[in-house]
Amino acid sequence: MEEDQILQDTLCPVDMITSGHDQLNHCCLDSTRKGLLSKITAWLDDIADPNDENDKSNVLWLSGAPGTGKTTIAWSLIAELERQQRSAGDFFFRQNQNWPSQLWCYLAYKMAKFHPAIKSEVYKALKREESDLPQDDIQLIFDQLIVGPLKCLAERLSSRRPVFLIDGLEQCSQGYSNWQALLDTLPQWLNLSRHYKLIIVGRPQHDIAKVFENKDIKRMELSVGENTDSYTHDDVRTYLNYRFAEIRKQDKSIPEYWPDYDAVSKLVTHTSGFFKWAALAVDAIEAEGDKERHLTTVIESGTTTTFESFDQYLEGILRMAFDSYSSEAFRATMGTIALSKQSLTMADLGHFLQHRFPSPSGVSLEDMCSRLLPIISIKGENKEIKIRHKAYKDYLIDSKRCALYSDVYFIDRSKAHRKMTISCLKIMQQGLKFNICGLKSSYKMNYEVEDVSALVDKCIPSYLVYACQYWADHLRGIATGEKRDTDIVNLLRNFLNIHLLYWLEALSLLSRSHIASKSLLIAAEWLEVYG
């Protein structure tokens, strides 16, 4: 009993004792997330995935955009691990409630509760300290209270296959000088025995991603937006059906089959894996007297629908990622990504923002994009960039929503389109030229040219391809103003007088000649207004 009291007094904050596992009822609904949970269970049981070369790692990073249900999955894992008596320690970070130095102390306490042999080793480690435990020295705590006991008991605990879980790590990243020290300890878990499994659940935050860069850890990412898989769509449908069934139980006047299949399907499409949006949408519908009418409004408006709690949620996400970054650099970058007509690569983005980075504050484009990781994805060798969910874009470009709390993140569509128009015209001015692909003869049809596709890819870079195709679309997005926009007028004059034929040639090689007439008509209409 004395050991228990010393461990509790030294390692475990009172509020964490009282919180306990009262959140276990927040697990995934039955029949949802089955595929994902099965894959994680297989990894925990050392059943190798032939398609994952890091499946033998003892660290799993389960990441996902904000609002994709990560914590619900974490509670489901804890519930199953407790059933199997394998849950050796878990920590659920909460913003403004926890700080970095608490993690390993509390996990050491949970380890001691998990197995008497660990309790003995942790207690001995504490007794070896002549003075109070230096809680600000995260590395020392990790070495003495986590690594030491686990290495000492590796063979003895192999049959127990203990699992440790950390959720919401990013929630304590702001304002703590020892945050990086905590991050530095995470990859050191790889040096422990393989049967000590560590699951880290959280957002794809830049500093967390960096500490795991080039490390042999197992990675899983929750799908959202355009990348949402059919299993996630099915899970969202199950969740929505459950919530609406609960509403019908509370209000017997609602028809048994409300809402119908098509209505739920439209909500599923809007949600696209964003469980937070689905939850708040149903909350809003439930709170209304005329639920049918409000459901119709939400279906018709989709992610442009205003939910005050949802907007506050997004504002908090942005503040966490950009608390000290230039708002102008943010708007320039996010405006280009959000309003682009197709996905851009990191290199493309660099050409469209070439005069803005490094920013006056010294921020590079790569730094900015890494900060954006909770709301954008960067995939593949070409580093293709996509906004993770339409809800983020709809919020950022709506002055009545985004600017309500702060105009730091608000993206003015007209200004963003103007910047993109100028960038496109300048890129074409710099890149277009006569016989851009160096064809040896002008008498051959494009399809008669040997390896014409490879030649086009080589000679017309992707950012120039984008500019040729979409400059007029961005021009059309500029709001009509009273003053003559001389910058764009001059660029258009140069384009039409000097580069028009070169542009038509490029469109022909790209098999996009059909857009020429529409683009020129847009330019003519725009010049009539501003000319």
Image (cartoon, rainbow, N blue to C red):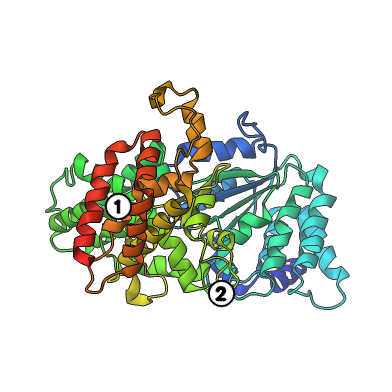
Q: Residues within 10 Å of mark 1 (few under 14, many from 20)?
A: some
Quickly name the residue at label 2: 360
Indicate the quadrant where residue 261 lies: top left
Quickly name the residue at label 1: 473
Q: CA distance from mark 2 to mark 1?
A: 30 Å
**Front-lying residue, 421 or 25:** 421
Residue at 74 percent of width and 52 percent of height = 189
Residue at 72 percent of width and 53 percent of height = 187
- Where residue 14 sits: x, y (%)? 61, 73
Amino acid type, residue under disc 1 in the picture: Asp
Indicate the quadrant where residue 188 lies: bottom right
- Element on which disc 2 rests: loop
Question: Which numbered disc flags the more N-terminal residue, 2 or 1?
Answer: 2
- Where residue 259 sits: x, y (%)? 18, 46
Question: Of the numbered discs in the image, which one, if any, rests on residue 24?
Answer: none
- Where residue 502 sits: x, y (%)? 39, 43
- Element on which disc 1 rests: helix
**Front-lying residue, 2 or 412:** 412
